[in-house]
Image (cartoon, rainbow, N blue to C red):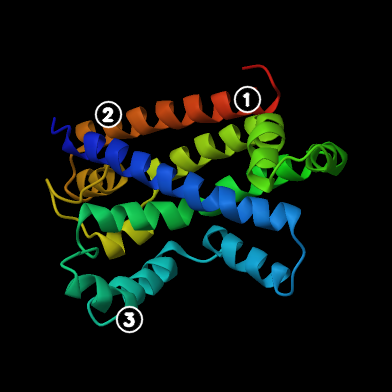
Amino acid sequence: MDLFPLFLTIKVSFFATVLTIAIGLTLAWVMAKRDFWGKGLLDVIIMQPLVIPPTVLGYYLLALFGRSGWLGGVLDSLGIEIVFTWKGAVVAAFISSLPLFVKPARAALEGVGADLENAARLLGKTEWQVIRTITLPLAWRGILAGAVMAFARATGEFGATLMVAGNIPGVTQTLPIAIYDAVQSGDSGAANLLVLIITLFSFSVLFAAGKIGRGRL
């Protein structure tokens, strides 16, 4: 059996999760600790990937990162290709998994008492020192649980990935797309094996996330 889809899925999920943590943690902190005009609208935008069809999300990403898109045109002039590359799969997985990270991370950050943070500020700590020494250490379980959920979601991303990265064997074919291919070609043996792999992985990830959330890991 060709293991490329498995290795590519791990690679894509890793980079997507790194992006999710880097950008999602900032968004979660802003949503948890700041009040501003348009906060509700931003929350709706962040959560959109959970409710809109994956094909619609893929269409938006194509419109944005395609060569005729405003961001895709800029990247193309710099020699950076997103559409129909593994990078496109990373973008699709990142956008799809972002809300699953932001939601628990925001809840964890909101659970950190403002009195502790204010006490640290009164003692002369800078905002970054407060975040690094007070906020993040107290909220790490929720953040880690969100990261695990985001990684799991990235491994299972299909619709948006298919539209943005395509189904190119040996180039952009991730595990979910390989399962689709195996079913379409009537290769039930390969399909069953791939489904078993991703099911066991997803079960393990969800089990671990639940343990983390309950403070048992």
> As shown in the figure, which amino acid type bears the numbered disc 3?
Trp
Residue found at the very far top of the displayed protein? 216
x and y percent of residue 101 in the render?
56, 46
22 lies above or below 194: below
Q: Which residue is mark 1?
A: 212
Image quadrant holding the C terminus, namely top right
Q: Which mark is residue 123?
A: none
* Contact flag, marks 2 and 3 (Cβ < 8 Å): no
Secondary element type, mark 2: helix
Q: Which residue is mark 2?
A: 193
Residue at 36% over, 39% down: 14
**Camera-side residue of 24 and 187:** 24
Secondary element type, mark 3: helix
Image quadrant holding the N terminus, namely top left
Of callouts 3 and 1, the N-terminal one: 3
Q: Quadrant of residue 56?
A: bottom left
Q: Which residue is mark 3?
A: 70
Residue at 37% over, 67% down: 58
Task: State left or right for residue 82 relative to residue 53.
Answer: left
x and y percent of residue 26 in the render?
58, 52
- The Cα atoms of the two marked residues, 3 and 1, are separated by 41 Å
**Camera-side residue of 201 and 22:** 22
Of callouts 2 and 3, the N-terminal one: 3
- The Cα atoms of the two marked residues, 2 and 3, are separated by 41 Å
- Within 10 Å of disc 3 (Cα), the crowding (few <14, some 14-19, many 20+) is few
> As shown in the figure, which amino acid type bears the numbered disc 1?
Ile
- The Cα atoms of the two marked residues, 1 and 2, are separated by 29 Å
Secondary element type, mark 1: helix
Of callouts 1 and 2, the N-terminal one: 2
Disc 2 versus disc 3: nearer the observer: 3
x and y percent of residue 134 in the render?
72, 34
